[in-house]
Image (cartoon, rainbow, N blue to C red):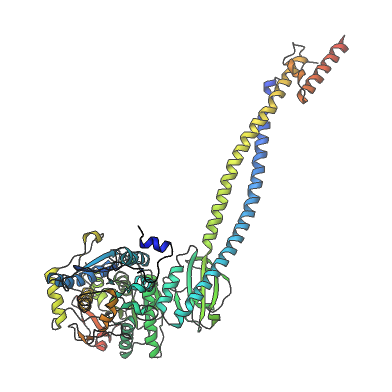
């Protein structure tokens, strides 16, 4: 039987690398995807809740501040009041209807959207609106003077929530890319670390098979799996030699 | 050394210790009165601030060259707010606290003045008043801030009521409103609504634009919104750039009905935008009817108008160079500068009535001594605790041969428009 010919340097470490790298990528991909989905859901839910809560607070503040102004019938001051609230990030529109449902102050340009004209301006329910040309909104309402003086409604831009989600996911993706790259480098280094003694063991085994002067004989002194295998190979070689005599 | 601040810090400032030194928040010395102004000298509405200032300065310059008031010259400390509320508030704070002006004078605009009024209330213990703002809005005429301002011009309520009454009188009851989306626009909108209610009618349609809109902007959306309401007239509550853009697009997109504008619009600037470089300017200007709160500057039979024209020609006031950031060619005469001139004339009379030892504490009483005062425009001016607006008159003008003239016959002018 002819001796096996493989050389230690021919060990297919690259295949091992590829599998390891692929595994790392798959792992990070799965983690990234699942956490992104979870994050989108969490950020969306929390921001929406926060937005609705803030909007209700703002609507209540406007409603409380509007009472005297409405009773004084000073609509210019009322408009000035809601214009100031429009400067708060996320608030895209505010409108106030009197007790008859007439729009007496609003911030729409070039006009009040048809969807809002058709809705009940005295409602205090929270609704989600999609206004053509303007975007998607969460709209909350608050009664003025328990509703007998009218209602104020505030529209918060859902586009801002989407933007914040995009930013959060974008930042998360960057983190995964960085951690993933570090993981791949670490995997290559670890695989290399494991492959080098294996390659030397292979050279040692080949030298035994060829009855050459054993190369890498220091492997016999190792106290690990490589050392055990080297000693095993040595034992088989010794048995083969004694059996042959 | 024990200073007043040290005493205050130690809680030792007893009631007998004056918390405010006599020189604090003075604005008056043996040489001058210092009046504080924040107005639009930049942006699309800069023509209003510039013209109002020029008209006032023509009279102040005249008084100063004649020796001032009891030897005191009148000096204006001016800041540009660009017709924006936040800079107006900042400027006013600076004027009152740092510059320590004697009073505030010649402000421009409802959204700016509306935001400044609470400051006046805050400083009410210093007797700080705002005189003759260029706005007809309600907040500085009514509680809770009406006590801190004195107005000369008629209100937007009076202007819009007059426009509505005249339109209704010629059979145009379906009235729509085009307005600036802020306190000024809302003030005019409320005036139209109230006036229509008296006739048993409602606003049939409304469209808005953002403050700061330029003449180059397209108003097609606004025109389409109003066209859908099928109005017989549109009352515009805006400034000249936006209202000129709307008038242009209304004609171009087929909304051929009378377009009324309030005095704040700045008629000459509006006319200039619609006429400049056009051979067919009448297409756009024939529909206009602008209300004014001062008589026509063309009517030299009115003594104050003749005086205004003389002093404008003699002094040709210019805005201080540091406030000129954008190109602007002033008008020889305009309704806005005439209003500024009348504001200044009445202001001088009030300062004169403060006597030899003028103080801010005496300002309100000095104003209340103005009874049946002849400004030289025919209508006499009176003030009192319950009367903080001097003039009530509203005039209506239309464009004829490239200039605004008094409208005498509404029926004849608009009989065939939109028919």
**Quarter of the image containing the N terminus of chain B?**
bottom left
Instruction: Give the camera-side residue of B27 and B214.
Output: B27
Q: Position of residue B91 (x, y in %)?
A: 33, 64
Q: Position of residue A215 (x, y in %)?
A: 72, 14
Q: Residue A107 falls in which quadrant of the image?
A: bottom left
Instruction: Give the camera-side residue of A116 and B50.
Output: B50
At horizontal 30% and vertical 81% (from top left) the residue drawn is B258
Up the image or down, B265 lies above or below B79; here it is below
Taking the image as drawn, is residue B299 in sight?
no
Instruction: Give the residue at the far top of this rendering.
Output: A245
**Quarter of the image containing the C terminus of chain B?**
bottom left
Instruction: Give the camera-side residue of A138 and A68.
Output: A68
Q: Position of residue B99 (x, y in %)?
A: 29, 64
Number of labels in the image equals 0
Left or right, residue B313 beside residue A56: left
Q: Residue B138 falls in which quadrant of the image?
A: bottom left
Left or right, residue A65 beside residue B19: right
Up the image or down, A209 lies above or below B115; here it is above
Taking the image as drawn, is residue B373 in sight?
yes
Up the image or down, A164 lies above or below B160; here it is above
At horizontal 56% and vertical 64% (from top left) the residue drawn is A51
Left or right, residue A244 beside residue B69: right
Q: Position of residue A120 (x, y in %)?
A: 54, 79
Q: Residue B70 falls in which quadrant of the image?
A: bottom left
């Amino acid at each position: 039987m002819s001796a096996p010919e493989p050389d230690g340097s021919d060990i297919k470490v690259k295949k091992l690398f590829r599998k390891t790298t692929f595994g790392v990528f798959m792992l990070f991909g799965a983690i990234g995807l699942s956490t992104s989905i979870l994050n989108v859901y969490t950020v969306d839910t929390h921001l929406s809740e926060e937005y609705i809560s803030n909007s209700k607070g703002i609507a209540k503040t406007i409603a409380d501040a509007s009472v005297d102004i409405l009773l004084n019938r000073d609509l210019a001051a009322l408009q000035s009041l809601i214009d100031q609230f429009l400067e708060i990030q996320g608030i895209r529109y505010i409108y106030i209807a009197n007790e008859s449902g007439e729009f007496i102050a609003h911030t729409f340009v070039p006009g009040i959207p048809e969807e809002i004209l058709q809705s009940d301006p005295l409602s205090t329910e929270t609704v989600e609106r999609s206004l053509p040309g303007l975007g998607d909104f969460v709209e909350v309402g608050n009664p003025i003077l328990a509703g007998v003086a009218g209602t104020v409604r505030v529209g918060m831009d859902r586009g801002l929530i989407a933007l914040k989600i995009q930013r959060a996911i974008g930042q998360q993706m960057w983190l995964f890319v960085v951690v993933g790259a570090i993981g791949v480098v670490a995997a290559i280094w670890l695989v290399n670390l494991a492959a080098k003694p294996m390659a030397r063991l292979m050279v040692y085994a080949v030298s035994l098979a060829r009855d050459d002067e054993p190369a890498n004989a220091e492997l016999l002194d190792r106290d690990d799996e490589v050392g055990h295998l080297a000693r095993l190979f040595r034992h088989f070689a010794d048995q083969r030699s004694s059996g042959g005599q | 050394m024990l200073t007043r601040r040290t005493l205050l810090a130690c809680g030792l400032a007893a009631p007998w210790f004056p918390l405010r030194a006599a020189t604090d928040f003075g604005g008056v010395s043996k040489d001058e009165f210092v009046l504080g102004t924040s107005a639009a000298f930049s942006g699309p509405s800069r023509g209003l601030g510039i013209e109002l200032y020029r008209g006032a300065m023509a009279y102040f310059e005249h008084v100063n060259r004649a020796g001032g008031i009891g030897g005191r010259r009148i000096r204006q400390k001016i800041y540009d707010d660009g017709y924006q509320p936040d800079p107006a508030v900042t400027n006013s704070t600076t004027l009152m606290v740092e510059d320590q002006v004697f009073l505030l004078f010649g402000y421009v605009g409802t959204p700016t003045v509306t935001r400044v009024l609470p400051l006046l209330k805050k400083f009410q213990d210093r007797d700080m008043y705002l005189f003759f703002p260029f706005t007809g809005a309600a907040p500085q005429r009514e509680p809770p801030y009406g006590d801190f301002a004195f107005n000369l011009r008629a209100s937007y309520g009076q202007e819009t009521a007059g426009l509505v009454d005249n339109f209704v009188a010629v059979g145009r009851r379906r009235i729509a409103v085009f307005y600036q989306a802020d306190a000024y626009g809302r003030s005019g909108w409320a005036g139209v609504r109230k006036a229509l209610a008296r006739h048993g009618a409602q606003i049939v349609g409304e469209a808005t634009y953002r403050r700061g809109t330029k003449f180059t902007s397209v108003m097609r959306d606004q025109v389409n919104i109003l066209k859908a309401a099928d109005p017989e007239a549109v009352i515009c509550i805006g400034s000249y750039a936006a209202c000129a853009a709307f008038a242009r697009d209304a004609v171009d997109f087929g909304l051929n009905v009378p377009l009324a504008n309030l005095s704040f619009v700045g008629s000459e600037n509006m006319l200039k935008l619609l006429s400049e470089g056009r051979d067919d300017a009448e297409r756009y200007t024939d529909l206009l009817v602008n209300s004014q709160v001062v008589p026509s500057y063309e009517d030299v039979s009115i003594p104050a108008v003749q005086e205004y024209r003389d002093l404008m020609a003699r002094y040709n006031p210019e805005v201080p160079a540091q406030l000129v950031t954008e190109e602007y060619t002033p008008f020889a005469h305009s309704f806005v500068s005439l209003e500024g001139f009348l504001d200044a004339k009445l202001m001088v009379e009030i300062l004169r009535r403060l006597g030899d030892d003028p103080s801010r504490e005496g300002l309100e009483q000095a104003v209340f001594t103005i009874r049946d005062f002849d400004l030289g425009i025919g209508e006499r001016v009176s003030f009192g605790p319950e009367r903080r607006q001097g003039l009530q008159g509203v005039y209506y003008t239309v464009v004829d041969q490239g200039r605004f003239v008094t409208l005498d016959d509404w029926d004849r002018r608009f009989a065939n428009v939109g028919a």
